[in-house]
Image: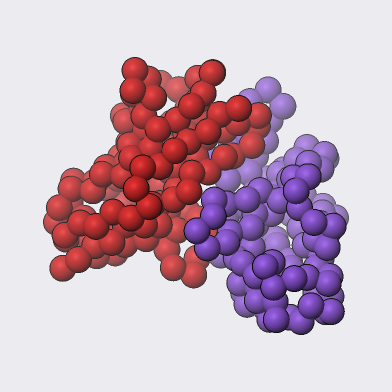
Amino acid sequence: AQSVTQLGSHVSVSEGALVLLRCNYSSSVPPYLFWYVQYPNQGLQLLLKYTTGATLVKGINGFEAEFKKSETSFHLTKPSAHMSDAAEYFCAVISFQKLVFGTGTRLLVSP
Amino acid sequence: ETGVTQTPRHLVMGMTNKKSLKCEQHLGHNAMYWYKQSAKKPLELMFVYSLEERVENNSVPSRFSPECPNSSHLFLHLHTLQPEDSALYLCASSQAARDRGHNEQFFGPGTRLTVL
């Protein structure tokens, strides 16, 4: 079965700093990978996805992620954090036709 | 209405009550899901209705009962719940295809359930 591991339950950055949220996957087949964001008291919103093709995927709100097969990673980045980016971020992979989520990383942004 | 809607947004119930959560999707999808989100735990997939099949997580207690009358509506019937069932219940939908499995899922805002 495919799975994902998110390193760090909390990440703190200053406004304007680089955001890096880590996700590693385990898969015996080419994976379909996703990043979702959850703002307080809301459901999950898709940020970006990787299925096939270009390994650098651009998403909404200035986020992007790079699929690196050699490192089994799909880390999420944003060059400059905004206060509005404070939320919880989930990495996910398709496994046996189901979406399997990581445990989430809470991003804290300070002024 | 657009996307995926859920009602009610908040629900407080006693352990002897019976209540239902409702989800509606306006995206023309053919698969719908119930998830449970508890503090400090991964999202737990409870039930899937996809391509006219129902798939359930065998660890979900029988006090949770799903119903999917058509591809746009999904219910979660609750009875004799326990305090540990307090959580955020999320509904999602997607377009599933037999040859490619499930595509990305679109989530509703959730129902915050408190069981006293």
Render colour scheme = by chain
Query: Chain B is which colour?
Result: purple
The answer to whether one can see residue B2 in this image is no
- Image location of residue B99, percent across then percent down: 68, 22
Query: Residue B78 placed where, x, y %?
Result: 80, 68
Q: Is residue A30 above or below residue B94?
A: above
- Tell me the residue at 65%/32% (across/down): A97
Viewer-proximal residue, A20 or A81?
A: A20
**Quadrant of the snapshot with the C terminus of chain A:** bottom left
- Against A53, residue A20 (above or below) is below
Residue B41: image location, x then y, percent: 54, 55
Q: Is residue A81 left or right of residue B95?
A: left
**Which residue is located at x 44 percent, y 50 percent?**
A104
Residue visible at 51% across and 23% down? Answer: A27
Q: Is residue A44 above or below residue B85?
A: above
Colour in which the image shows chain A: red
**Total marks in image:** 0
Is residue A6 at least partly visible in the picture? yes
Q: Residue at x 70, y 62 (%)?
A: B23
* Foreground of the two, A41 or B2: A41
Q: Quadrant of the N terminus of chain A?
A: top right
**Residue A79, position as x, y percentages in the image:** 18, 46
